[in-house]
Amino acid sequence: MKARKKSGEATSSMQEALRALGPYMGLGLQLALGMAFFAVGGYLLDRWLGTLPWLTLVGVVLGLVAIVAKLWQVNALLQRRSRRPEHDAAHEK
């Protein structure tokens, strides 16, 4: 009986850990796919137009800009969330 209870607790804690990691894994995937989209798009346009490596470089730069923009957006969201409890506590007084 005790083994079954420990197994359930381990599963529950693993689920909580995965739930906590979910947003970060999603962010990593968004950053990687954003960079890949622009870099591969630039490369394919380069091959089609015969302008290698210029559009690939433009695609990489655009991918980096997309990464910075996403990180900026996430940072702003996290700052708003961290300020919210202070804001609510000030209004309660």
Image: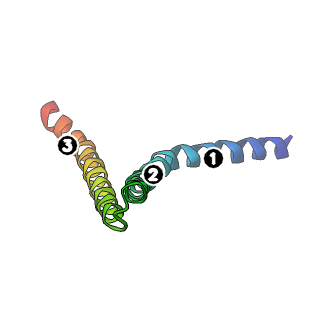
**Relative side of 92 to 66, left or right:** left
Cα separation, mark 1 vs mark 2, equals 30 Å
**Relative side of 70 to 33, left or right:** left
Q: Give neighbour class at mark 2: few <14, some 14-19, many 20+ (Cα, 10 Å).
A: some
Q: Which mark is residue 13?
A: 1
Question: Horizontal and vertical percent for residue 8?
Answer: 74, 41
Q: Nearer the viewer, residue 78 or 30?
A: 30
Q: Secondary structure at mark 2?
A: helix
Q: Which residue bears the numbered disc 3?
A: 86
Cα separation, mark 1 vs mark 3, equals 30 Å
Cα separation, mark 3 vs mark 2, equals 36 Å
- What colour scheme does the image use? rainbow
Q: Earlier in the sequence, mark 1 or mark 3?
A: 1
Question: Horizontal and vertical percent for residue 39?
Answer: 40, 58
Q: Which residue bears the numbered disc 2?
A: 33
Q: Nearer the viewer, residue 67 or 39?
A: 39
Q: Secondary structure at mark 3?
A: helix
